[in-house]
Image (tube, rainbow, N blue to C red):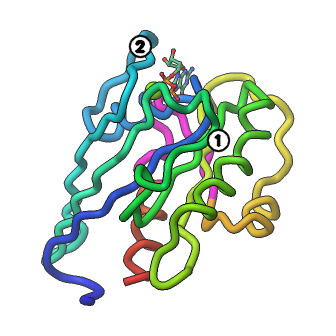
Amino acid sequence: MQTCGGEHLYKVLVVGDLGVGKTSIIKRYVHQIFSQHYRATIGVDFALKVLHWDDDTVIRLQLWDIAGQERYGNMTRVYYREAVGALVVFDVTRASTFDAVLKWKDDLDAKVTVNHGKPLPAVLLANKSDQVSIQQPKLDSFCKENGFVGWFETSAKENTNIEEATRCLVEHILANE
Ligand code: GDP
Ligand code: MG
């Protein structure tokens, strides 16, 4: 497979507990909007972001929002199929959502791999960083120990680090081709 040039379509999963800001991050990233009042839609939602990565590479990121099913804490294999990367989101104001991060990572690793068994590249997002944060351990070692390719403090509200986090993920996706 080519490593650069041409057009790529990538399925990216956005997972994490209810209310952490998955839908807000996607709306911010794709539509440049933020609202306090998203309803927890039921079903699966997609958004498409087109990146002009370089002079001869166009990347279409298909972002999958789990929309209401996150209350079960896992998704089906069918849902994860063909995904090439993931954003795992927690809410810095709610410790329980950080505790759930490993559950989501394990679910991904159990159900989807890329390139003959390699784990799906996943970036950890510490969202709502515009709010008062519960004490967070430094996430560098956490990411290393648990197989995340990186982490970012994000805010969908203030548009902080969402582009950077996605860029990091795309770089790892491209490196897997
Ligand atoms: P989801 O269930 O993970 O999709 O979470 P939502 O995107 O629906 O967000 C849940 C709530 O958190 C909504 O009221 C959002 O407005 C709010 N929210 C999401 N991201 C942020 C953020 O970065 N900062 C703040 N302050 N609120 C946020
Ligand atoms: Mg949502």
The residue at 73%/40% (across/down) is 100
What is the span of residues highlighted in magenta in the rendered image?
151-165
Residue 97 placement: quadrant:
top right
Residue 126's mark? 1
Cα separation between marks 1 and 2: 21 Å
Q: Residue at x 41, y 66 (%)?
A: 84
* Identity, as a three-letter code, of the amino acid under mark 1: Ala
Q: Nearer the viewer, mark 1 or mark 2?
A: 2
Q: Position of residue 58 (x, y in %)?
A: 17, 67
The one nearer the camera, 74 or 163, is 74
Please tell me which residue is depicted at 85% across the width and 47% down the height of the picture. Answer: 137
From the viewer's perspective, tell me whether residue 85 is left or right of residue 106: left
Q: Any magenta on residue 161?
A: yes
Point out the residue furthest to the top here: 37
Q: Position of residue 74 (x, y in %)?
A: 60, 42
Res 157 visible: no
Kind of residue at badge 2: Arg
Local packing at callout 1 (Cα closer than 10 Å; few below 14, some 14-19, many 20+) is: many
Ligand 1 within 8 Å of disc 2? The answer is yes
